[in-house]
Image (spheres, rainbow, N blue to C red):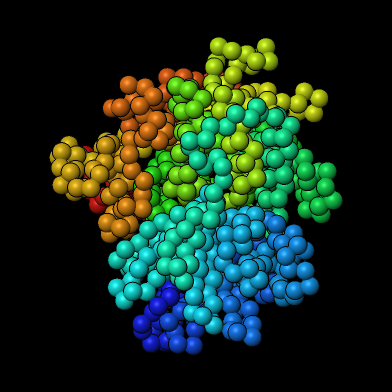
């Protein structure tokens, strides 16, 4: 994936427009540090910039924007994408066509030439994408985004009537009075002048409650296929490993596939896995166990509460939100270390909790019907939450993150089952051994005693939200810090400073302040989701428990069913779980990186608010 910036209907001179777009495109260079190129129409009214991260076909033949010459005129396109079925598209749709590139993104413009920008043309793409296509002959342009919104895209309108598209808001916020998040599963065609939905799966209609019984074998095969297709890369890849069910399953499937395949990469070295947390964090201990069992080349990193706080300003600049910050900070710090080791692509476990009702608040789901509606709500809004964080935090360092659970074919299977299969009942043990806990159907699909994917202690480990799993002290430390820097006087006047949706906690006061210093417009504020949330619920699900209506806490510990990971904490103290040795990397057990050029010499309070701690 990469970074794209495009503008159409520009009124300046060709040279003015070119200079302006090149300057703004530099704000996206962290997304594509390997190369950058630009297209400008002869009149200068259409410009497309691309910041490239070389993943598939790392030669110059993969440079973007692509240009396809036709008798009618050129077709120009740029994408932030990974098209996993590009080889199949070449065979089935573009047989005999010389694409002049092995890049997966090269198929987009050729499909456009053959079919036009139809829903069927976009639907033929199996992958993640945010694309812009320009037709020189007609002057028409189109933009479209993948089904769930894995690849970010914003769009807006300039004072001169120009229309802008960008991978990140920062590149267009000074040019557009009105800007919005470009919605996933949608397409904009200038010929029609309106947004339209191209992705319309049956499960998206909340009035249709599935009744199909769960098939463990089908579910298992669908996830395996999804993971395998995401191993497509000409650059080194690795796995984010929290030690929880989701990331551990992805890693286990990948390791098994690479061992069984003829992949040269799998024969030359072990798969790299990565984890981060405060010392003694639950996730670190669980990740060690999984890495040992899988035989991966595991890298463990530590961070401190102070390092996390010092990274807040830069982190918010990159994720362009004041939500998801607790989980984004450790991912941001980890991504830098991963990229420094030469890794360009990682797989992670986002999406499973939304699909299977994995968050602890789902224990309170009042009915299968409401369980299903909530999973649809969560998936429909994921592009504003976990997916945004999972993409932008790693891309701050030019690291691409792939999410197998959000594969559109896997979603058809997992969201097509009777939601009663996903209901939680800790008093019932369907197999006579394990209680029907969160994500039970997924756990049982990979519960193979003869050839286990994961040990029982991991396969049936309770959900830990990433911000909790990296260390409870991180969440508590951030809240304590906010209580010191936000004085009683500041808190009492919060509605004056934040008249639109004032923060409900002092932690959000700090995060909102950092956001508005860097993204001051009201339009930017409106790109951030709002509303009451308990343990990552949607606002609608807060009604499930009367006690939640006055509670605003995203930590899983806000729900009474949470059980601290005492088993892993105890093993951490006794060091029963060793860290696998990483080739060329030493001292991982006690490594606490200082991140000198991320952190400021100023105290956290001075850096964030320009004040001394109260």
Q: Tell me residue 102's x, y (percent).
A: 72, 68
Residue at the spot 44% in from the left edge and 60% down from the top edge: 195
Tally of marks? 0
Q: Residue at x 59, y 55 (%)?
A: 128
The picture places residue 488, in percent across and down from the top left corner, at 17, 37
Q: Can I make out residue 330 in this image?
A: no
Is residue 145 visible in the rendered image? The answer is yes
Q: Quadrant of residue 409?
A: top right
Question: For this view, does 229 lie left or right of residue 379?
Answer: right
Looking at the image, residue 127 lies above or below residue 289: below
Which residue lies at the image location 49% right of the left edge and 55% below the top edge? 197
* Above-or-below relation of 94 to 355: below
Quadrant of res 450: top right
Q: Of 148 and 600, which appears nearest the observer?
A: 148
The percent coordinates of residue 528 (x first, y second) are: 36, 49
**572 to the left or right of 602:** right
Which residue appears at 29% of the width and 45% of the height?
510
Is 357 or 26 nearer to us in this picture? 357
Q: Position of residue 544 (x, y in %)?
A: 39, 24
* Screen quadrant of the C terminus: top left
**Quadrant location of the N terminus in the rendered image:** bottom right
Identify the image quadrant of residue 119.
bottom right
């Amino acid at each position: 994936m990469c970074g794209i910036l495009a503008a159409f209907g520009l009124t300046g001179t060709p040279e003015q427009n070119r200079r302006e777009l090149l300057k703004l495109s530099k704000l996206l260079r962290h997304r594509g540090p390997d190369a950058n190129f630009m297209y400008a129409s002869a009149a200068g009214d259409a410009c497309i910039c691309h910041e490239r991260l070389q993943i598939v076909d790392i030669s110059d033949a993969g440079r973007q924007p692509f240009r396809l010459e036709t008798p009618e005129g050129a077709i120009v396109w740029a994408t932030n994408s990974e098209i996993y079925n590009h080889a199949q598209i070449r065979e089935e749709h573009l047989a005999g066509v010389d694409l002049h590139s092995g890049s997966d993104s090269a198929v987009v413009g050729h499909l456009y030439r053959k079919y036009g920008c139809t829903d069927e043309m976009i639907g033929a793409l199996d992958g993640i994408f945010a694309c812009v296509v320009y037709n020189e002959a007609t002057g028409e342009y189109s933009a479209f985004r993948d089904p769930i919104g894995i690849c970010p895209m914003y769009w807006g309108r300039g004072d001169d009537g120009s229309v802008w598209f960008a991978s990140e808001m920062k590149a267009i916020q000074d040019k557009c009075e009105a800007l919005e998040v470009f919605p996933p599963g949608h397409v904009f065609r200038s010929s029609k002048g309106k947004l339209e939905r191209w992705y319309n799966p049956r499960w998206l209609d909340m009035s249709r409650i599935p009744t199909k019984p769960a098939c463990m074998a089908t579910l298992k095969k669908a996830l395996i296929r999804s993971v395998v297709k995401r191993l497509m890369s000409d650059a080194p890849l690795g796995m984010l490993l929290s030690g929880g069910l989701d990331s551990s399953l992805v890693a286990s499937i990948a390791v098994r596939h690479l061992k069984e395949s003829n992949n040269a990469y799998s024969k030359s070295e072990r798969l790299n896995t990565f984890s981060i947390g405060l010392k003694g964090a639950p996730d670190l201990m669980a990740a060690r166990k999984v890495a040992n069992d899988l035989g991966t080349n595991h890298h463990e990193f530590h961070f401190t509460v102070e390092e996390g706080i010092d990274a807040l300003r830069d982190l918010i600049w990159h994720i362009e939100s004041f939500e998801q910050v607790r989980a984004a900070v450790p991912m941001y710090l980890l991504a830098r270390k991963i990229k420094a080791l030469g890794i360009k692509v990682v797989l992670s476990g986002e999406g499973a909790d939304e699909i299977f009702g994995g968050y602890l608040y789902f224990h309170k789901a009042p009915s299968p019907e409401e369980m299903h509606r909530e999973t649809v709500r969560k998936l429909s809004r994921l592009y504003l939450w976990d997916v945004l964080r999972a993409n932008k935090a790693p891309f701050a360092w030019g690291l691409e993150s792939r999410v197998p659970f959000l594969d559109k074919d896997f979603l058809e299977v997992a969201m097509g089952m009777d939601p009663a299969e996903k209901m939680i009942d800790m008093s019932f043990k369907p197999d006579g051994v394990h209680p029907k806990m969160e994500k039970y159907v997924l756990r049982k699909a990979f519960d193979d005693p003869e050839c286990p994917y994961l040990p029982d202690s991991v396969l049936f480990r309770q959900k830990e939200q990433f911000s909790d799993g990296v260390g409870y002290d991180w969440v508590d430390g951030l809240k304590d810090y906010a209580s010191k820097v936000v004085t009683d006087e500041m808190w009492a006047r919060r509605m004056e400073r934040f008249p639109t949706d004032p923060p409900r906690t002092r932690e959000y006061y700090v995060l909102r302040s950092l956001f508005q210093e860097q993204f001051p417009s009201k339009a930017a504020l409106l790109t951030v989701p709002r509303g009451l949330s308990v343990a990552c619920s949607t606002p609608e699900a807060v009604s499930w428990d009367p006690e939640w209506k006055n509670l605003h806490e995203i930590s899983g510990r806000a729900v009474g069913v949470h059980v601290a990971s005492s088993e892993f904490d105890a093993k951490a103290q006794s060091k029963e779980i060793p860290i696998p040795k990483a080739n060329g990397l030493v001292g991982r057990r006690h490594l606490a990186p200082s991140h000198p050029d991320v952190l400021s010499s100023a105290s956290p309070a001075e850096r964030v608010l320009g004040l001394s701690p109260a």
